[in-house]
């Protein structure tokens, strides 16, 4: 069974296109994790009235990436053999990459990633900084072949084996999930490619871009600490990279996993 987890916060007028792409791919179960919305995202999804949609609704914001963990648990409990993760604002033409990710899982890959920077063109200084830490994590973990690909960016797929071998709470810090998967000797591959601009994610302000960058950098640092077996840290050369990390609702996640 093929499932898809779609984190969605204030994605009205975008979410329907994402869900239509998933339906075209042939997803059996679509799990929108609607959280902290103040717009019509929930109504827009409900109006589709598709039998494969199972909405997971939280009135409060779960924080960045926490919806992945929640959706993954539900998908696992429903018997999914492959789970796709697609953000609710990615309205680009993702059908081909999604099919490639699913095919990789069918060929016994456990964590299939998308390369969103297949060329080195037009990288801003902020992007270059983030990619430095993504490459550093992959390289120091012995995964040089991943380049700068990261489960933090672009569509991702995981196998049922992954769902049982990696604590699903780790998906709330995607690079940490990658490190744990590698330590568990799971198969990790880059299975799809789409330039970042073609994801057509929602354009937000410069402050948001810097907060996301700090989140991903801090996540990579924390993941590397886990891989090296040392206490977790989000600091590098005297600077702590928090970003949106403090807004992750670990309390809600813990309660959900105790149900």
Image: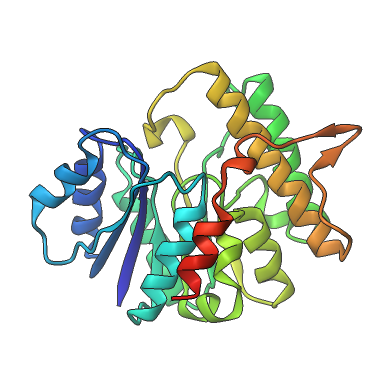
Q: How many marks?
A: 0
| Residue 104 visible in the picture | no
Q: Quadrant of residue 72?
A: bottom left
Relative image position of residue 109 (x, y in whole percent): 53, 72
From the viewer's perspective, is residue 67 above or below residue 184?
above
Where does the image place residue 128, in percent across and percent down from the top left?
Answer: 69, 28
What residue is at 30 percent from the left and 78 percent from the top? Answer: 1
Q: Position of residue 155 (x, y in %)?
A: 44, 51
Q: Does residue 155 lie above or below 72 as drawn?
A: above
Examine the image and state in which quarter residue 210 appears.
top right
Residue at position x 34%, y 47% in the image: 59
Q: Provide residue 153's location: percent of width, then percent of height.
A: 53, 44
Question: Is 43 rendered above or below residue 255?
Answer: above
Image side of residue 102 versus residue 23, left or right: right
Residue at the top extreme, as displayed: 206
Residue 139 visible at all: yes
> Which quadrant: the C terminus?
bottom left
Q: Nearer the viewer, residue 106 or 185?
A: 185
Q: Nearer the viewer, residue 173 or 191?
A: 173
Q: Is residue 154 left or right of residue 131?
A: left
Q: Quadrant of residue 187?
A: bottom right
55 left or right, relative to 258? left
In this rendering, the answer to whether 120 lies above or below 69 is: above
């Amino acid at each position: 069974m093929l499932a898809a987890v779609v984190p969605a916060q204030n994605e009205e007028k975008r979410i329907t296109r994402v869900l239509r792409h998933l339906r075209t791919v042939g997803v059996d179960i679509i799990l929108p994790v609607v959280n902290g919305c103040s717009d019509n995202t929930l109504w827009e999804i409900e109006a589709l009235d598709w039998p494969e949609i199972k909405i997971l609704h939280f009135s409060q914001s779960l924080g960045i990436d926490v919806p992945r963990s929640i959706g993954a648990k539900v998908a696992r409990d429903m018997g999914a053999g492959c789970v796709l993760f697609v953000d609710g604002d990615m309205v680009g033409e993702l059908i081909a990459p999604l099919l490639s990710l699913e095919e990789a899982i069918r060929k016994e890959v456990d964590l299939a990633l998308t390369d969103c920077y297949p060329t080195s063109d037009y990288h801003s200084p902020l992007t270059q900084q983030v990619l430095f830490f993504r490459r550093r994590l992959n390289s120091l973990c012995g995964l040089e072949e991943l380049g700068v690909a990261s489960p933090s960016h672009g569509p991702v797929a995981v196998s049922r084996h992954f769902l049982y071998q990696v604590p699903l709470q780790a998906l709330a810090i995607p690079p940490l999930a990658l490190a744990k998967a590698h330590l568990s000797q799971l198969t990790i591959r880059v299975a799809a490619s789409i330039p970042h601009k073609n994801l057509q994610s929602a354009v937000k302000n410069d402050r948001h871009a810097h907060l996301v960058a700090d989140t991903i950098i801090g996540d990579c640092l924390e993941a590397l600490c886990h891989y090296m077996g040392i206490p977790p840290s989000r600091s590098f050369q005297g600077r702590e990279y928090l970003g949106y990390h403090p807004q992750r609702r670990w309390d809600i996640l813990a309660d959900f996993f105790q149900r």
